[in-house]
């Protein structure tokens, strides 16, 4: 299966070639390591640099910063192909989010400093919004960045941060003005190497996505140069976060589509071989109908996601439409994986079959990147004008 169809308006021949190359790289370098990474709770650090060498992370970044100079469709392929191999351990989605924050808002000097290292995997990125006391309500963050000479002093804590244990560059959502509500929020890029007062907590134990490191982060008077304020202007953080949400939400829908394609393929293989009452499980009408429903949902999602990529490349993907893709994609992923697992019978509950892992991995897609309830709220707001 493929993200790209004959009618994908955004896709050119070079996208198809890129998809083949990404697939080959994953088959050789990612798939054989997935189980080991699940056991160790994170992806090997040198996988990032191998992905960088293979050009997997650079497709959508300008040549001025070490990229290949293509559009967002290249990152969409990287994410889809990962899902289509049943993996969500490698945190490339977050790397892509960080890179596109820099592309959209960083000063020229900041872009030169960080983007070339992110495309090669020399640096791993993370984005730290969520705190122990607040997730959905981002305006309520309590982490502060107070001016101190030519620096900020970061104080506070974050939790559930993807790539948090591996990251060298963390975009921290902090208040530069505690009295100004949303207008007091800024994004501060913390380079973790040698950062005194910065501490990583536990690698959190999770229901799924076990190969993805998810961290608590603590900041105690961490000195960050003022030149690390993203975009160089205070109080822009909330606006910057909102502007990048369409891509963050579409990424989740792309993972959903890849995972659905993988789940269906694995299930078809299984039910064609498994016998019950003298016939293949594939031959029962219930099995055929369940798989037909799943396949129909996959094709609906594929069309929608392709349309969203076209809109995003044209600068026309609005927040409500991206929220629909995130909400519907992640819900559909959970429905499909649930039905597919059932068709495996007891083996679906055993970790030796990837469908069991996908069941755990899929659940969080309805939670992170803004919960599906928040997505519905945003969609409803677009109606109530
Ligand atoms: C595996 C994982 C990885 C993550 N990675 C990152 C990361 O890299 N960076 C990062 O910053 N965060 C990350 N998160 C955090 C994630 O984005 C938050 O968990 C999520 O936004 C929800 O916030 P919360 O957990 O505080 O839930 P809460 O905001 O406390 O929500 C609890 C419940 O209340 C509902 N609710 C809240 N407000 C409303 C409302 N207005 N209307 C209706 N219902 C509402 C929610 O939908 C939810 O059901 C990650 C989380 C997980 C689990």
Image (spheres, rainbow, N blue to C red):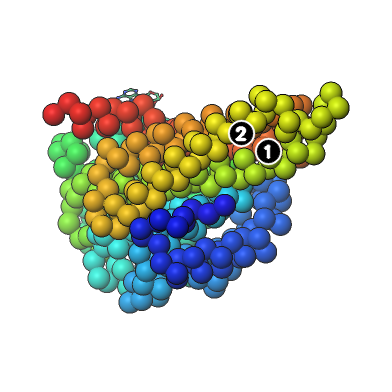
The mark that comes first in sequence, 1 or 2, is: 1
Residue to which mark 2 is pinned: 291
Residue 89 visible in image:
no
- In the image, is residue 134 above or below residue 26? above
Residue 149 visible in image:
yes
Q: Residue at x 33, y 32 (%)?
A: 375
**Residue farthest toward the right in the current orientation of the protein:** 278
Dot 1: few (<14), some (14–19), or many (≥20) neighbours within 10 Å? many
* Residue in front for this viewpoint, 159 or 27: 27
Q: Position of residue 100 (x, y in %)?
A: 34, 58
Res 288 label: none
Quadrant containing ligand 1 reads top left
Image marks 1 and 2: residues in contact by CB distance under 8 Å: yes
Left or right: where 276 falls relative to 159: right
Residue 325 sits in quarter: top left
Label 1 within 8 A of ligand 1 by Cβ:
no
- In the image, is residue 126 above or below residue 194? above
* Residue in front for this viewpoint, 142 or 56: 56
Dot 2: few (<14), some (14–19), or many (≥20) neighbours within 10 Å? many
State the count of labels.
Answer: 2
Residue 353 sits in quarter: top right
- Quarter the C terminus occupies: top left
The span from disc 1 to disc 2 (Cα, nearest Å) is 8 Å
Q: Position of residue 244 (x, y in %)?
A: 29, 50
Residue to which mark 1 is pinned: 267
Q: Position of residue 191 (x, y in %)?
A: 40, 60
Mark nearest the camera among 1 and 2 is 2
Q: Residue at x 59, y 61 (%)?
A: 23
Mark 2, secondary structure of its residue: helix
Q: Residue at x 23, y 51 (%)?
A: 316
Left or right: where 252 falls relative to 210: left
Q: Position of residue 302 (x, y in %)?
A: 45, 46
């Amino acid at each position: 299966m493929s993200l790209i169809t004959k009618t994908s308006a955004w896709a050119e021949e070079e996208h198809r070639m890129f998809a083949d190359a990404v697939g080959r790289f994953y088959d050789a370098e990612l798939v054989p390591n997935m189980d080991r990474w699940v056991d160790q709770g994170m992806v090997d650090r040198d996988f990032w640099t191998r992905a960088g060498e293979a050009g997997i992370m650079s497709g959508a970044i300008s040549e001025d910063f070490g990229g290949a100079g293509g559009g967002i469709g290249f990152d969409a392929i990287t994410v889809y192909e990962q899902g289509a191999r049943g993996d969500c351990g490698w945190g490339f989605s977050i790397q892509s989010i960080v890179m596109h924050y820099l592309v959209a808002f960083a000063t020229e000097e900041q872009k030169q400093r960080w983007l070339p290292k992110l495309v090669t995997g020399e640096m791993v990125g993370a984005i730290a919004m969520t705190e122990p006391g607040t997730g959905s309500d981002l305006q309520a963050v309590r982490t502060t960045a107070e001016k101190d000479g030519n620096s900020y002093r970061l104080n506070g804590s974050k939790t559930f941060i993807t790539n948090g244990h591996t990251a060298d560059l963390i975009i921290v959502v902090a208040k530069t003005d505690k009295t100004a509500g949303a207008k007091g929020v800024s994004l501060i890029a913390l380079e973790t190497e040698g950062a005194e007062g910065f501490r990583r907590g536990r690698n959190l134990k999770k229901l799924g996505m076990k190969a993805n490191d998810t961290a608590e982060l603590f900041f105690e008077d961490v000195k960050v140069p003022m030149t690390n304020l993203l975009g160089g202007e205070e109080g822009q953080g909330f606006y910057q976060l909102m502007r990048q949400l369409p891509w963050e939400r579409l990424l989740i829908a792309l993972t959903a589509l890849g995972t659905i394609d993988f789940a269906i393929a694995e299930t078809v293989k299984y039910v064609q071989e498994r016998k019950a009452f003298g016939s293949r499980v594939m031959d029962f009408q219930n099995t055929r109908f369940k798989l037909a429903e799943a396949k129909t949902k996959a094709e609906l999602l594929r069309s929608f996601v392709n349309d969203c990529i076209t809109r995003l490349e044209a600068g026309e993907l609005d927040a409500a439409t991206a929220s629909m893709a995130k909400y519907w994609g992640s819900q559909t992923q959970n429905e499909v994986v649930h039905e597919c697992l059932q068709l495996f019978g007891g083996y679906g509950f055993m970790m030796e079959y990837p469908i069991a892992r996908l069941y755990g991995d899929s659940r969080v897609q309805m939670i992170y990147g803004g919960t599906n309830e928040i997505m519905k709220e945003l969609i409803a707001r677009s109606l109530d004008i």
